[in-house]
Image: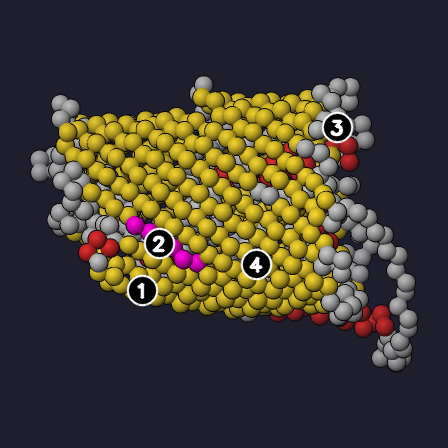
């Protein structure tokens, strides 16, 4: 299959070349040169519409601008992304967000960029307000100028640059969940002084949440005898305060050069209190007693990071230009937790202290040279260098001051270096055919040193990991002659997923109620990147100004798949503990289809009301070799996902109504021969009402997660210990709640 993919793409290129040759002459008549026709050029002072950008791009991408970002009055960007075609939100609870994923693939397969650059460690989609974003670009296949670490695809978040901003914008909002208020203030101030233009954007918010969860853990022997039954009830409440700033400045020189700089600053503080009650109503003789009856935990976390992006664009002779990019990042995270465990009589059993301090810094530098090679032919080449440094210290102590793992208190330093070279060529061969060809080489080196800081034993352990990937990329689009609204896309790409620093060299993360279903977690310095060969095929039919109906299919062939495996180890106190470690397990394949429709109802029925319709559906399949079926799927990959949204604008009143429904069915994955993981379905119904009081002021009422489905999960592990096999099943039920919000938006 992999050999047929590039042949198909070469055929895509060869067909238009043959057609072009036939247009210029035949075998009997020599080709004669003629003057190229004079083309009419229309110059406007605004960028192309979102749909025009999507339609004209050779390497397919979807663009979602301010209209989509403002539609539902979402408080964070994750709520916007969950409604996009092929995008799911993993982890977390319905209505609470989580990490963003494409094509149903798990965490790490989707590349998230901010202004084309990788965000700093600690960046969360939940921390970014839609008011700070100008548009979101979704690319199913990688392109050379961005990293090819995008097996599922790339989501590029372009921060607001103020190119159309003229007024001061103020937005006040308040969300209510279980009676807890979460106010939010957002400001956007554009300005211009001569050739200097700027945009100052900021968001200040407080998020209050209450969570509860109920868990059941059952150990069952092969003969069906219940060896142990545990019931656990958790309750927590917390407050998070966050400040986000995104200033941008742009200066234009007399010679036409431009200098741009965009900063992104985030500060977040959270305080959480939690209680846990553990009961063990059934246990056979010889089974260890429950570790505690009740537990109280107080935790605090503080995160601050800043990332700066800049570029200088220099015009060269002709239409060539040089774009030099630069950036830096600084970050720090401190967290501490104090946990007290008591017996049934309320006597103190143990006290655990966990602290974690991380410091990150990095710089990046790159350049991109572009030059037209005749009409409709654009060549680009570039390079990137990025370095990063992390310092981390984690301490875990019990009430006697004893360390909970062997390296507790050690200083971990990690250095990463990434170098990339790329070249790409976009060629409009004929009005009907366009081709994009590119190649990117990327090398990553990670070095870590772990030393016992308290004892002064520096450089006690040094680990190095080197990897490099060569990624050829080929995209093509055929605009069907005589059907100006229809086009077909085909792509063949090489992409990869590199292990992150945590997976390579992380200090262990301890589970306070350690079990096969709740293991400790650590890293593996010998991990290799996952390599994928992919093909994408899409048909697009455009409707009116901003409508589209499309169908697409994809396939990814993955080598060196990374999965976590369960083992046991001896802790410093002599107890046997379960631990989860990542490793390369072999080969996997995934494929899927994605359907999308976006249109105004009046485009189909002349007398229809002013209703905008947004619908998409995706179906995914996957298989991991070496693991028995039928559920030997890629981790966390849903089989299906769908979205339906409607917006109705009243003619006789300044009111707009809208609703959207997001659905993901339950997921069952056989992650190994011993482990099966299940996640319940997700159904999220959101609705809003928008009242435009004046030309400058509007009020938005919205409700999210109106169905409030419980989040249910099951984790089954066939564990062997002491010469016997025990089935360990851990089940969790986490209630979710509707969130009601009001938002005032005004301009001055």
How many C-alpha atoms fall within 10 Å of the one at disc 2: few (<14), some, or many (≥20)? Answer: some
Between marks 4 and 3 in the image, the one whose residue lies nearer the viewer: 4
490 sits left or right of 42 in the view: left
Judging by the rendered image, the residue that carries numbered circle 2 is: 391
2 sits left or right of 409 in the view: right
Q: Earlier in the sequence, mark 4 or mark 3?
A: 4
Q: Are marks 4 and 1 in contact (CB under 8 Å)?
A: no
- Gap in angstroms between the C-alphas marked 3 and 2: 56 Å
**Which is nearer the eye, 463 or 148?**
463
Q: Earlier in the sequence, mark 3 or mark 1?
A: 1
**Which is nearer the eye, 106 or 340?**
340
Q: Earlier in the sequence, mark 4 or mark 1?
A: 4
The percent position of residue 196, horizontal first and vertical second, equals 70, 48
Q: Tell me which segment is drawn in magenta.
A: 388-393
Between marks 2 and 1 in the image, the one whose residue lies nearer the viewer: 2
- Gap in angstroms between the C-alphas marked 2 and 1: 15 Å
Judging by the rendered image, the residue that carries numbered circle 3 is: 610
Q: Is residue 485 magenta?
A: no
Residue 573 appears in the figure: yes
* Quadrant including the C terminus: top right
Regarding mark 2 in the picture, which secondary structure is present there? strand
Q: Residue at x 78, y 41 (%)?
A: 544
Judging by the rendered image, the residue that carries numbered circle 4 is: 326
The percent position of residue 599, horizontal first and vertical second, equals 71, 37
Regarding mark 3 in the picture, which secondary structure is present there? loop
Q: Residue at x 73, y 63 (%)?
A: 315
The percent position of residue 259, horizontal first and vertical second, equals 66, 55
Q: Are marks 3 and 2 in contact (CB under 8 Å)?
A: no
The percent position of residue 199, horizontal first and vertical second, equals 65, 42
Report the disc number at residue 463: 1
């Amino acid at each position: 299959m992999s050999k047929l993919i590039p042949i198909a793409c070469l055929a895509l290129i060869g067909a238009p070349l043959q057609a072009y040759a036939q247009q210029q002459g035949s075998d009997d008549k020599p080709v004669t040169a003629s003057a190229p026709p004079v083309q009419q050029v229309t110059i406007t002072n605004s960028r192309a519409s979102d749909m025009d950008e999507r339609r004209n791009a050779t390497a397919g991408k979807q663009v979602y601008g301010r209209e989509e970002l403002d539609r539902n009055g979402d408080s964070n960007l994750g709520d916007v992304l969950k409604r996009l075609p092929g995008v799911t939100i993993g982890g977390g609870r319905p209505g609470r967000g989580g990490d963003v994923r494409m094509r149903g693939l798990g965490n790490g397969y989707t590349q998230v960029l901010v202004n084309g650059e990788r965000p700093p460690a600690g960046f969360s989609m939940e921390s970014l307000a839609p008011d700070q974003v100008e548009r979101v670009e979704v690319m199913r296949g990688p392109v050379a100028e961005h990293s090819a670490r995008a097996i599922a695809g790339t989501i590029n978040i372009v921060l607001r640059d103020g190119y159309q901003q003229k007024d001061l914008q103020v937005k006040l909002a308040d969300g209510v969940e279980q009676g807890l208020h979460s106010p939010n203030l957002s400001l956007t101030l554009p300005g211009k002084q001569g050739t200097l233009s700027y945009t100052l954007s900021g968001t200040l918010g407080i998020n209050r949440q209450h969570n509860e969860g109920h868990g059941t853990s059952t150990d069952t022997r092969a003969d069906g005898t219940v060896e142990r039954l545990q019931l656990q009830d958790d309750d927590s409440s917390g407050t998070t305060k966050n400040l986000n700033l995104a200033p941008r400045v742009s200066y234009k020189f007399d010679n036409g050069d431009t200098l741009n700089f965009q900063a992104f600053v985030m500060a977040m503080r959270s305080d959480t209190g939690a209680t846990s009650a553990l009961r063990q109503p059934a246990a056979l003789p010889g089974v260890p007693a429950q570790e505690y009856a009740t537990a109280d935990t107080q935790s605090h976390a503080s995160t601050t990071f800043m990332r700066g992006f800049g570029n200088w664009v220099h015009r060269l002779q002709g239409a060539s230009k040089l774009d030099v990019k630069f950036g830096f990042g600084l970050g720090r995270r401190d967290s501490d937790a104090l946990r007290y465990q008591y017996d049934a009589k309320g006597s103190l059993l143990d006290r655990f202290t966990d602290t974690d301090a991380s410091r990150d810094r990095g710089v990046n530098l790159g350049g991109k040279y572009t030059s037209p090679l005749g009409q409709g032919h654009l060549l680009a080449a570039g390079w990137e260098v990025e370095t990063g440094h992390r310092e981390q210290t984690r301490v875990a102590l019990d009430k006697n001051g004893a360390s909970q793992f062997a390296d507790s208190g050690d200083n971990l330093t990690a250095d990463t270096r990434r170098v990339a070279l790329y070249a790409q060529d976009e060629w409009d061969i004929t009005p009907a055919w366009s081709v994009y060809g590119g190649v990117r080489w990327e090398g990553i080196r990670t070095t870590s040193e772990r030393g016992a800081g308290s004892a002064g034993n520096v450089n006690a352990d040094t680990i190095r990991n080197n990897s490099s990937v060569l990624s050829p990329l080929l995209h093509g689009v055929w605009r069907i002659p005589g059907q100006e609204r229809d086009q077909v896309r085909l792509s063949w790409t090489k992409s990869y997923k590199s292990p992150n620093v945590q997976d390579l060299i992380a200090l262990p993360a301890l589970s306070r109620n350690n079990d096969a279903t709740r293991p400790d977690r650590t890293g593996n310095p010998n991990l290799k990147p996952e390599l994928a060969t992919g093909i994408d095929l899409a048909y697009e039919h455009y409707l009116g100004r901003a409508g589209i109906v499309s169908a697409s299919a994809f396939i990814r062939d993955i080598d060196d798949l990374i999965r976590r495996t369960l083992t046991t180890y001896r802790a410093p106190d002599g107890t046997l503990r379960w631990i989860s470690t990542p490793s390369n397990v072999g080969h996997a394949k995934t494929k899927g289809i994605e359907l999308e429709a976006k249109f105004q109802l009046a485009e189909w029925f002349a007398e229809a009301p002013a209703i905008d319709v947004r619908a998409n559906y995706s179906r995914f399949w996957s298989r991991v070799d070496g693991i028995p079926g039928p559920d030997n799927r890629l981790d966390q990959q849903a089989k299906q996902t769908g979205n339906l949204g409607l917006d109705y604008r009243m003619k006789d009143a300044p009111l707009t109504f809208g609703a959207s429904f997001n659905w993901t069915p339950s997921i069952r994955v056989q992650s190994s021969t011993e482990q099966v993981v299940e996640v319940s379905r997700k159904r999220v119904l959101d609705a809003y009402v928008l009242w435009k009081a004046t030309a400058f002021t509007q009020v938005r009422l919205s409700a999210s997660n109106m169905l409030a489905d419980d989040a249910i999960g099951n984790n089954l592990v066939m564990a062997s210990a002491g010469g016997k096999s025990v089935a360990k099943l851990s089940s969790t039920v986490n209630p979710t709640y509707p969130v009601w919000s009001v938002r005032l938006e005004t301009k001055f």
